[in-house]
Amino acid sequence: MNKIYASIVCLAALCISSPSKAQLIRAKEIFSQADSLRGQLTPLRTCYDVQYYHLDIQVDLDNKYIEGSNVFKFKAVEDFDKLQFDLFDNLSVDKIEYKGKTLPFERRHHAVFVTFPVSIKKGSIDSFKVYYSGNPVQATRAPWDGGFDWKKDSNGKHFVATAVQGLGASAWWPNKDHQSDEPDSMLISVAVPKDLMNVSNGRLIKVDSLDNGYNKYHWRVVNPINNYNVALNIGDYVRYSEKIKSEDGPLYVDYYLLRENATDEKIAHLKKNAAQTIEALEYWFGPYPFFEDSYKLVETPHLGMEHQSAIAYVNKYQNGYLGHDSSNTGWGKKWDFIVVHESGHEWFGNNITAKDLADMWIHESFTNYSEALFIEYFYGKEAGQAYIHGNRKGIKNDIPMQGPYHVNKEGSGDMYVKGGVFWNMVRTMIGDDLKWRYILRSLNRDFRHQQVDYNDILKYISKHAALDLKKVFEQYIQHTSIPTLQVKFDQDGHAYARWKTEVSDFNMPVHLGLGKANHRFDLDKEFKLIDIQDLKKDNLTIDTFNYYIKVEIQ
């Protein structure tokens, strides 16, 4: 986004609502009015709660053009006569219709402001319909930059998909483009040429044959869905279906492969990885959260994305991440990275969704950690922890994992690997694997289909772990540096230890000892006696394998 000038209103709001000193520091960045219009929950957005969308479009593949409509069904949270929805300004708002009448509107950047002829009363259920058209943003490096990914397969047929996380769903369809508001259900209707197929989220309920040489595919989503997860995938697909075992019963599973890839070997690869992924992640996180909408793996022209119930898949039907193991331990090449990681988002990202893009670390940290838990389920705890430790080399400690609030900006890419390391460390602090599994499953039960923020996760895990993790979260998530464990020995050979951090009043347990680091000590910023008999500098062992810390020994 273009950040040429600062919005005084935006910066003031950031300083008022930021929950920590770290956020106040981040608020010094310069953001545009477009950023704040997209990122802030103003009264023009909070006045209505979206209940249902019906997105109905036709895609002109040759001209990279879309046209159609979206119905907003909403519940009025307050009395209002004006609201904001979002649509990128390169797309035309052709008409807004309400009870048979055309509504006036104005546009500012990517925000659209609609005025109603009467006051919409609090508690009422109402709707309006937006007609729109144009050439949507074209991705050049999807899914990293976002937009429509227009490609062709090896047979010369169109192969097209959307990927808009971060960029925003309003890059291609009108909606309230904020992660805090999800429709309870949705109908996605997409018309494509008859020699192709469209695959979207949820279940296919019917296909209409149109007179213009197109077929319209209707996909019904019955669970809440975040806007950036709504996807279309257009290609010459071959579909394979099966049912696999899940905690809620037989789960409907579909695989959509390009015709050129529809071989027994490749479908067998997907089936094996899908079944193992559901089995392992249900064990750790609880029942698959979109059972009614089924589970799909859909081949796309771009690398994977967590599109709810329609996981975008490109990994060349092989284990690892495009054949590689980021941990260099060997454990990362025993399973298909894209299937596991993107499916992990069905629990963290899709089931539990961050209210603000600033807390995208919630999605990616847990999902990175899910890779290690998958390994642990099949190969043992030591293997999973070795994978986590091996990934550390990718940590940059450049900026905080948490981004600034209300300006549609996420934090550091460290939210992936550093995030996974962080959760393994929290588990080590708790020291009770049964309790840890209970916490992970309970998170997905108690926050099922809900939106959360930093404080929700902090308070929930602290409560159920019976640990005060406030300062630990603050240091690792809202700052860049990691704690330094300072250990000193006095003239009598006694050992003392403390934490050195930029966070005030920091406290965190750590495991250390003789030979094996099996003694837990709760330390803060004051030196504390390490009461272990015969402990010396040359036999002191600190668990730096599971604790991501620096060590200074004096």
Image (tube, rainbow, N blue to C red):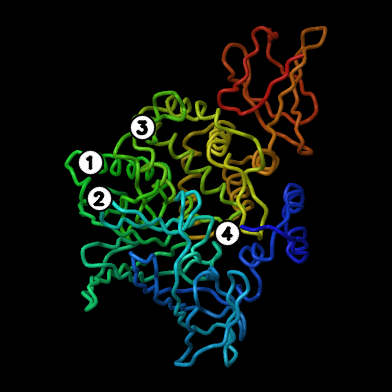
Q: Earlier in the sequence, mark 1 or mark 2?
A: 2
Alpha carbon of mark 4 to alpha carbon of mark 3: how far? Answer: 34 Å
Q: Quadrant of the C terminus?
A: top right
Alpha carbon of mark 2 to alpha carbon of mark 4: how far? Answer: 33 Å
Q: Which mark is residue 266?
A: 1
Instruction: Give the amino acid type for the residue marked by disc 2 in the picture.
Output: Leu
Q: Is residue 100 left or right of residue 199?
A: right
Q: Earlier in the sequence, mark 4 or mark 1?
A: 1
Instruction: Give the amino acid type for the residue marked by disc 3 in the picture.
Output: Gly
Instruction: Give the amino acid type for the residue marked by disc 4 in the picture.
Output: Lys
Give me the residue at 27% from left, 71% from top: 216
Give me the residue at 34% from left, 41% from top: 315
Alpha carbon of mark 4 to alpha carbon of mark 1: how far? Answer: 37 Å
Alpha carbon of mark 2 to alpha carbon of mark 3: how far? Answer: 19 Å
Number of the front mark, 2 or 4: 2
Alpha carbon of mark 1 to alpha carbon of mark 2: how far? Answer: 9 Å
- Up the image or down, 372 lies above or below 488; here it is below
Circles 3 and 1 in contact, beta carbons < 8 Å: no
| Mark 1 residue crowding within 10 angstroms, few (<14) / some (14–19) / many (20+) | some
Question: Which residue was labeled with disc 3?
Answer: 323
Q: Position of residue 269 (x, y in %)?
A: 25, 39
Q: Which mark is residue 257?
A: 2
Give me the residue at 69% from left, 66% from top: 33
Q: What is the quadrant of residue 200 in the picture?
A: bottom left
